Amino acid sequence: MSYELIDGKLVASKIREEIKDRVAEIKSKHSRIPGLAAILVGEDPASEIYVRNKRKACEDVGIYSEEHKLSGDIAQEDLLKLINRLNGDENINGILVQLPLPEHIDDSTVLNSVSPEKDVDGFHPINAGLLFEGKPRFIACTPHGIIKMLEFYDIDIEGKNAVVLGRSNIVGKPAAMLLLQKNATVTICHSRTRNLDAVLKSADLIVAAIGRAHFVTSKMVKEGSIIIDVGINRLDDGKLVGDVDFENVKDISSYITPVPGGVGPMTITMLLWNTVVSLEPVSYTHLTLPTSDLV
C-alpha cells in the first residue's frame, strides 16, 4: 500500500511561524521577550549540538537565550545554586537542564529544583501531575510534538489501539497520557513485556521510543498502521536511523515519520512554544495549524 510521510520539518516550520508572531506580539504589548536559559554540564558532543540548535532556534523566532556551560565535575550543590538563581531571574522564564547529567549528580533532585513555572521541559512532578489531570501547564516537548504532527495530518486516533514502546518519563509515559486524552486505547510496552511482537502487531498506532536501531521490523507491524519513530541511533558508519526499520516498514504503513526529519524538529519547536507559554500562559488549543492538504 502507499504511505504518507509525516514531515516533521514542515510541521515545525508552521508552528515556528506562529511562535515568531506571538513573540513579536508579546514584545509590542509588554516591552519584553521570552527568555530561555540552557544548562549544559560536561562535554557530551550530542548535548552540545542539541543546545546549539536550540540557541539557533531561539534566535530565529526572537526568543532571548543564554547558555551556562559547566564543568563535568561540578558539585551538585553548585549546580542547584545556579538553578535557584535562574529561578529568581525575571529575564528568564524558561529553564532547560540538558540531559544526561554526570553520574555523580542526581537527575531527579536537579530537575525537581527547577521552578514549576519555568520548567519548559515539562519534567517537574507538578507539571507531570497537571498533565495527568488533563490540565497541563507545560507538556513534555517530544510527546507534544507527536500530537501536533498527528493533528496537522488530520489523523484521527480516537478509538484506535495505540502502543507506546518505551516507558521513560521524558517520552513514553507522557506520550501515553496524551494519546489516552485523545481517546485512544493505549498500551505501554517495555523490556518485560511478554509477546511483544503480538502486541505491536495489534496496534493501529505505534510510538517507538526505546533507543534501539531498527528494532521494530515489518513482521511486528500490521498493514495500515501509523508509525511514529522517536528513536535517534547512530550506526557504525555514522548514519542516523530510528527505532523502526524504515525501509521495510514504510510500504505497509499508512503514515510514518522519517529519521532524521520527523519527531526531532518538533521537540525543539515545542520547547520554544513552552518558553512562550511560560511568559504569557495561553491555552494549548490556541496553537492551531492548517492541515497538510492546505500546504
Image (tube, rainbow, N blue to C red):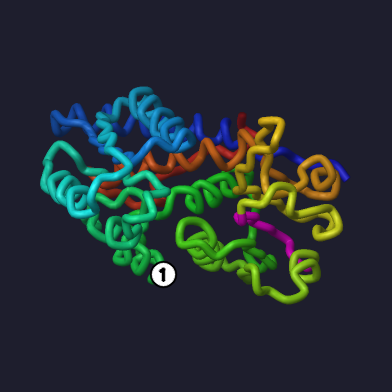
Seen at 57% across and 42% down, the residue is 263
Q: Residue furthest right?
A: 1
Please state the horizontal and vertical placement of residue 20, each as a whole percent of the image: 35, 28
| Quarter of the rendering containing residue 259 | top right
The picture places residue 72, in percent across and down from the top left corner, at: 32, 42
Left or right: where does residue 26 sit relative to residue 130? left
Q: Which residues are magenta?
A: 202-210
Residue matched to label 1: 132
At a point 48% along the width and 51% down the height, the residue shown is 144
Q: In the rendered view, does 90 fall on the left or right side of 131?
A: left
Looking at the image, how many numbered discs can be counted on the residues? 1
Which quadrant of the rendered structure holds the C terminus? top right
Q: Residue 237's image quarter?
A: top right
Q: Nearer the viewer, residue 211 or 79?
A: 79
- Magenta-drawn stretch contains 203: yes
Q: Quadrant of the N terminus?
A: top right
Tell whether position 242 is magenta.
no
Q: Most extreme residue toward the front, as rendered?
A: 73
At mark 1, the secondary structure is helix
| Residue drawn at (51%, 46%) of the image | 145
